[in-house]
């Protein structure tokens, strides 16, 4: 009896230093169903092939690949390279004009254009390899810029006579996007709208029984593309299997990419959904189209999964694809991970309202980098974005990361509906105080499918005008309605304060300066027995080294990690002492030694040598009856 075989494929533009977690998890699902699995990380072959054909150095190619996969993703560059391999000269010229209008340089445009020929060779080679495996089912996973390459191979397979089942899943297939793909690309037999584990199992069962492919759960079959997905209520716990990355390192070697092995990080998944979004959906967030409901794996499984992957593949670096860290893990899963006593590294996305004790727990469990949902350093702006945070909480989080040696990769969003000039001005002023911390990226807001901006634009005074222009070039044969259905990013119009244009320019320039001079910036404190030594080397501020003694030292110690005025008063800074303390805090604010918001204050210096084993400030300070504070410190921006 011929063995049942399924090929699971991930096309460019996945990161070459990460196996596809979708392929890894679905391999585990298919093997549990008794199928033989061919995991094909096709993006590795492309990554190896392109620089040889184009004559690029390894470094130049790495930069070009990252440019296309990440920075130019919103222009559909990766999709266009594969979908328009044989585009007519006039079509190519029109797309190049778009790239130039978006300030893409001529060298990059030349590489993008030349990659179409590489894409053609890659499509042919991938098709040949898949046909040689003789699978009854070929499953493609597609997210970000993978549609163009995936559909090109699916169509070539049909041209070559492949009669098996082709199914497409991934985030590019959620909602109307998958149905539009199914309706417009006959090479596909089915798409998966949402999580794919149960859908793949159902499809494999149908094929094994020699039944025609039909819709089941989140599996949407051809001919039933208008059917609604059956609503599946997720369990309280996430129970998806551990990813199986067998074959990735062999393919890395076969492709001649052994040099990348030291940089490989393994994707892991411990939760789905977003516990914050289930309460208050951030206005701009288009993640979790299938379901916002949050569920995580049992905490007892986390350390065991990491230990297995370290033992199986010899990799110590892990990248959690979770939208947000389960805060319950701070007391359960992460202490067990710490007990592994291995030198691994973990990446998580987190909400920035964590206290320093939480950051310390993460770091001791090997979380060396995070992406916090900061988005703004203005409380007013955060309120408009429905972030459920304040500028004070965000600054406190960044300082805590510096204090305990966790790298924070974060963004400032601008250009959104309801953005006030005062919000931008406050951030322009504040960043001068933070140049010793890891700088952000400044990002203009995008209107993404499934976000409140797109689901309810009128609520924000927003009118959606069209999909991002790159879609028209990547899918020139699609009707306007299909283009709207297949797109994830949209352009929109809203009433904006005319002052904001210049203020955004100033903010971007200030952040660029921050990024360029961050390497020379520092602001540290060292604790003596009864003293505090401050050493300030932030660009644009007077360099100074100051030793605080007596009450000044005690007060500075009290505001490390952040506190409230009333808690300072509860610690003995009350009565006449409070007047003196308040005057001292005012002077420190003028020198940018502390950040004050309302009646909260935090020291801006960070410990001379970060350590995850340092005792954090007390968590959950007991509250006392609020006393009237005679003076609220104003920010420097307000005093001007």
Image (cartoon, grey):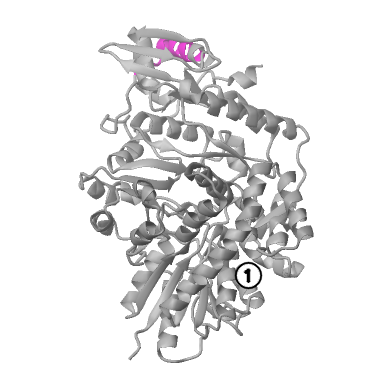
Q: In this image, 6 relative to 315: left or right?
A: right
**Residue 573: percent from the left, percent from the top?**
38, 16
Q: Could you tell me which residue is drawn at 36 percent across and 74 percent down? A: 37
**Residue 485: percent from the left, percent from the top?**
67, 67
**Residue 430: percent from the left, percent from the top?**
56, 25
Q: Can you identify the residue that label 1 sits on?
A: 176
Q: Could you tell me which residue is drawn at 67 percent across and 63 percent down? A: 84
**From this viewpoint, is residue 70 visible?**
yes
Is residue 547 on the magenta stretch? Answer: no
Query: Where's the N terminus, which quadrant?
Result: bottom left
**Residue 585: percent from the left, percent from the top?**
47, 15
**From this viewpoint, is residue 264 visible?**
no
Q: In this image, 168 relative to 402: left or right?
A: right
Magenta stretch: helix, strand or loop mostly: helix
Q: Is residue 106 above or below residue 475?
A: above
* The residue stretch that appears in magenta: 572-586
Q: Nearer the viewer, residue 158 or 509?
A: 158
Q: In this image, 269 relative to 520: left or right?
A: left
Q: Is residue 506 above or below residue 330?
A: above
Is residue 584 on the magenta stretch? Answer: yes
Q: Circle 1: is it few (<14), some (14-19), or many (20+) Cα within 10 Å? A: many
Q: Secondary structure at mark 1?
A: helix
């Amino acid at each position: 009896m011929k063995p049942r075989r399924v090929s699971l494929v991930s096309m460019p533009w996945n990161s070459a230093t990460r196996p596809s977690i979708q392929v890894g998890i679905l391999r585990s699902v298919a093997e549990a169903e008794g199928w033989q699995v061919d995991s094909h990380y096709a993006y590795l072959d492309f990554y190896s092939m392109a620089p040889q054909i184009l004559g690029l150095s390894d470094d130049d190619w790495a930069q070009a690949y990252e440019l296309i996969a990440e920075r130019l993703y919103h222009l559909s560059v990766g999709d266009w390279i594969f979908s328009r391999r044989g585009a007519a000269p006039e079509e190519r010229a029109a797309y190049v004009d778009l790239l130039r209008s978006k300030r893409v340089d001529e060298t990059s445009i030349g590489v993008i254009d030349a990659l179409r020929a590489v894409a053609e060779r890659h499509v042919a080679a991938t098709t040949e390899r898949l046909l040689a495996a003789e699978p009854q089912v070929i499953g493609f996973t597609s997210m970000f810029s993978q549609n163009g390459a995936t559909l090109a191979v699916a169509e070539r397979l049909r041209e070559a006579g492949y009669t098996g089942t082709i199914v497409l899943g991934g985030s590019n297939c959620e909602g109307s996007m998958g149905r539009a793909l199914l309706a417009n690309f006959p090479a596909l037999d089915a798409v998966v709208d949402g999580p794919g584990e149960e859908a793949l199992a159902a499809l494999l069962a149908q094929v094994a029984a020699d039944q025609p492919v039909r819709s089941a759960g989140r599996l949407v079959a051809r001919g039933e593309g208008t059917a609604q997905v059956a609503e599946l209520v997720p369990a309280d716990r996430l129970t998806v299997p551990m990813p199986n990355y067998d074959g990735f390192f062999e393919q890395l070697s076969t492709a001649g990419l052994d040099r990348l092995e030291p940089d490989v990080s393994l994707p892991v998944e411990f939760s789905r959904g977003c516990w914050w979004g289930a309460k208050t959906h951030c206005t701009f967030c288009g993640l979790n189209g299938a379901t916002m409901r949050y569920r995580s794996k049992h905490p007892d499984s986390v350390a065991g999964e990491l230990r297995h992957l370290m033992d199986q593949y010899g990799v110590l670096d892990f990248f959690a694809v979770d939208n947000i860290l389960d805060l319950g893990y701070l007391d359960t899963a992460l202490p067990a991970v710490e007990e592994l006593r291995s030198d691994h590294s973990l990446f998580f996305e987190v909400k920035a309202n964590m206290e320093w004790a939480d950051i310390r727990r993460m770091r001791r469990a090997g979380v060396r980098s995070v992406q916090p949902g900061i988005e703004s350093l203005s409380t007013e702006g955060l309120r408009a974005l429905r972030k459920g945070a304040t500028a004070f909480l965000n600054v406190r989080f960044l300082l805590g990361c510096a204090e305990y040696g966790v790298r924070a990769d974060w963004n400032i969003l601008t250009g959104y509906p309801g953005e006030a000039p005062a919000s931008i001005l406050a951030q322009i002023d504040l960043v001068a105080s933070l140049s010793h911390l890891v700088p952000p990226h400044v990002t203009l807001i995008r209107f993404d499918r499934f976000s409140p901006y797109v689901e309810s634009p009128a609520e924000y005074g927003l009118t959606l005008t069209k999909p991002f222009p790159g879609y028209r070039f990547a899918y020139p044969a699609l009707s306007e309605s299909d283009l709207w259905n297949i797109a994830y990013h949209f352009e929109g119009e809203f009433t904006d304060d005319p002052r904001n244009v210049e203020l955004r320019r100033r903010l971007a320039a200030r952040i660029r300066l921050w990024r360029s001079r961050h390497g020379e910036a520092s602001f540290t404190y060292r604790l003596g027995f009864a003293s505090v030594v401050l050493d300030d080397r932030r660009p644009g501020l007077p360099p100074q080294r100051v030793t605080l003694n007596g009450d000044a030292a005690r007060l500075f110690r009290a505001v490390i990690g952040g506190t409230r005025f009333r808690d300072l008063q509860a610690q003995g800074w009350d009565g006449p002492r409070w007047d003196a303390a308040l005057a001292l805090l005012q002077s420190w604010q003028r020198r940018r030694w502390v950040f004050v918001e309302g009646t909260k204050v935090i020291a801006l210096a960070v410990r001379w040598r970060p350590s995850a084993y340092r005792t954090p400030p007390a968590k959950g300070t007991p509250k006392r009856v609020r006393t009237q504070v005679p003076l609220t410190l104003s920010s420097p921006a307000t005093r001007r």
